[in-house]
Image (cartoon, grey):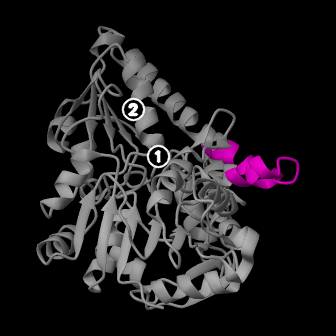
């Protein structure tokens, strides 16, 4: 099977690196995105997201003519769908973007094409995608009706990469490939082996969907244990950072570090897809979500306590005189991604309730997100250290780790990551 022209639908944090890696393997890649600014940026050989070395790969791919972006799908041999899958009210999966992508590519499909859903999805989403395509193209046959003999091959292959290391992990990591039929899986593997050096492990579509959800739910449960432990230790006057360090000396214990919550489009979202499908059975997974979703409120309570201490020790001042500095907005260290970020939510709450000045330090962005932090000021680290009364550590970016202890003296600290109080 040869797929010389590949269309990647959705040019975000997964789609664009995937398109770039395919183009680097001398595949003609047509990237599709509904954001015209992103399309224009890519066609200039530039990028609209932060990911190490991606700018170099994209620039080369565009300059050499292997990668081109557009707002409308065009004919191709294979289509990779990498669009968002958020949840809506009640933590129910929202497949709006996947459905829109299916409707967009349907008119350009031809016999022999391969369609792969890479978006993290609830169980059954790949089958839904195939049904939507079948409705739009009754002249073609699909796996749910014609099995191995179908005109169009459909598969699910979830991404499993770490932001900040996407280009390397796209190539080196194993991939789980779940076709709706064995021939669908075979076709998908043939495409991925174009650039994947790891193993392509074949299963069915439903298991592939559940595999990604399971991986992130496993991580969410482990983070919830660490976060709950930090709350318990705070109540018992125990240094949780020291405790975890000691416990991890056990050869079969590896407790993660607590934080202000869980963010990103994966770990904070994917477990809900399992809960939505099996609400009575997914008890532990749901509890972990509740623990992690509750951690920002605990951090905010710590900030309120720090403000109270500051005012009691400075009776001449009022709440309007208190300057709070929030270090970090991204959902994890050293990236610019603010999706589902507990740090962003905490900073928003502080800004909305703090009568004084709220400073934000986020070295990976140039401006604050519109309409989210209107009462905040984006500043450099040194300015915050010199002017803040209360410092709130939310994201342990590398530049924050090298701040000298003496620079923090005289400030009230709320360190949710333990980099200054460990």
Between 410 and 211, the one lying in front of the other is 211
Vertical relation: 130 (above or below) 412: below
Residue at the (69%, 86%) spot, across then down: 182
The mark that comes first in sequence, 2 or 1, is 2
Vertical relation: 54 (above or below) 275: below
Between 411 and 14, the one lying in front of the other is 14
Q: Main secondary structure of the magenta part?
A: helix
Q: Residue 416 got which mark?
A: 1
Vertical relation: 244 (above or below) 1: above
Task: Give neighbour class at mark 2: few <14, some 14-19, many 20+ (Cα, 10 Å).
Answer: many
Q: In the figure, residue 215 lies in which quadrant?
A: bottom right
Residue at the (14%, 64%) spot, across then down: 45
Vertical relation: 299 (above or below) 185: above
Range drawn in magenta = 273-292
Residue beneath disc 2? 347
Q: Position of residue 224 (x, y in %)?
A: 65, 53
Secondary element under disc 2, as helix, strand or loop, is helix
Q: Position of residue 293 (x, y in %)?
A: 61, 41
Res. 14 in view? no
- Please check the rendered image and state whether residue 274 is part of the magenta-colored stretch, yes or no: yes
């Amino acid at each position: 099977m040869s797929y010389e022209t590949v269309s990647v639908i959705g040019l975000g944090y997964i789609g664009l690196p995937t398109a770039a890696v395919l183009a680097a393997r001398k595949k003609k890649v047509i990237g599709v995105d509904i954001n015209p600014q992103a399309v224009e940026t890519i066609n200039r050989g530039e990028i609209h997201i932060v990911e190490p070395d991606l700018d170099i790969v994209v620039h080369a791919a565009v300059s050499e003519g292997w990668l081109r972006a557009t707002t409308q799908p065009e004919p191709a041999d294979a289509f990779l769908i990498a669009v968002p899958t958020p949840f809506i009210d009640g933590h129910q999966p929202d497949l709006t973007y996947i459905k829109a992508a299916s409707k967009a590519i349907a008119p350009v499909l031809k016999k022999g094409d391969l369609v792969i859903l890479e978006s993290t999805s609830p169980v059954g989403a790949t089958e839904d995608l195939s049904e939507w395509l079948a409705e739009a193209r009754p002249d073609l046959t699909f796996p749910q009706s014609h099995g191995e003999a179908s005109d169009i091959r459909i598969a699910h292959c979830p991404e499993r990469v770490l932001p900040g290391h996407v280009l390397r992990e796209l190539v080196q990591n194993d991939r789980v490939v779940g076709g709706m039929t064995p021939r669908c899986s075979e076709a998908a593997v043939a495409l991925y082996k174009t650039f994947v050096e790891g193993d392509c492990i074949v299963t069915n579509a439903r298991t592939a969907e559940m595999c990604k959800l399971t991986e992130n739910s496993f991580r969410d449960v482990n983070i919830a244990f660490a976060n709950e432990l930090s709350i318990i230790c705070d109540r018992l006057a125990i240094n949780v950072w020291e405790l975890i360090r000691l416990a991890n000396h056990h050869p079969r214990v590896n407790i993660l570090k607590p934080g202000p919550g869980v963010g990103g489009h994966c770990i904070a979202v994917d477990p809900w897809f399992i809960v939505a499908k099996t609400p009575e059975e997914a008890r532990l997974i749901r509890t972990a979500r509740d623990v992690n979703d509750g951690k920002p409120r605990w951090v905010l309570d710590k900030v309120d306590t720090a403000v109270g201490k500051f005012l009691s020790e400075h009776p001449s001042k009022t709440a309007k005189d208190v300057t709070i500095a929030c270090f970090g907005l991204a959902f994890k260290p050293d990236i610019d991604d603010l999706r589902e970020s507990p740090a962003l939510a905490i900073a928003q709450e502080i800004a909305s309730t703090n009568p004084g000045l709220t400073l934000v330090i986020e070295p990976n962005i140039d401006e604050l997100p519109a309409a989210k932090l209107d009462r905040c000021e984006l500043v450099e680290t040194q300015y915050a250290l010199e002017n803040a009364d209360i410092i709130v550590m939310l994201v342990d970016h590398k530049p924050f780790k090298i701040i000298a202890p003496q620079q923090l003296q005289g400030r009230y600290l709320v360190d949710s990551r333990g980099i200054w109080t460990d």
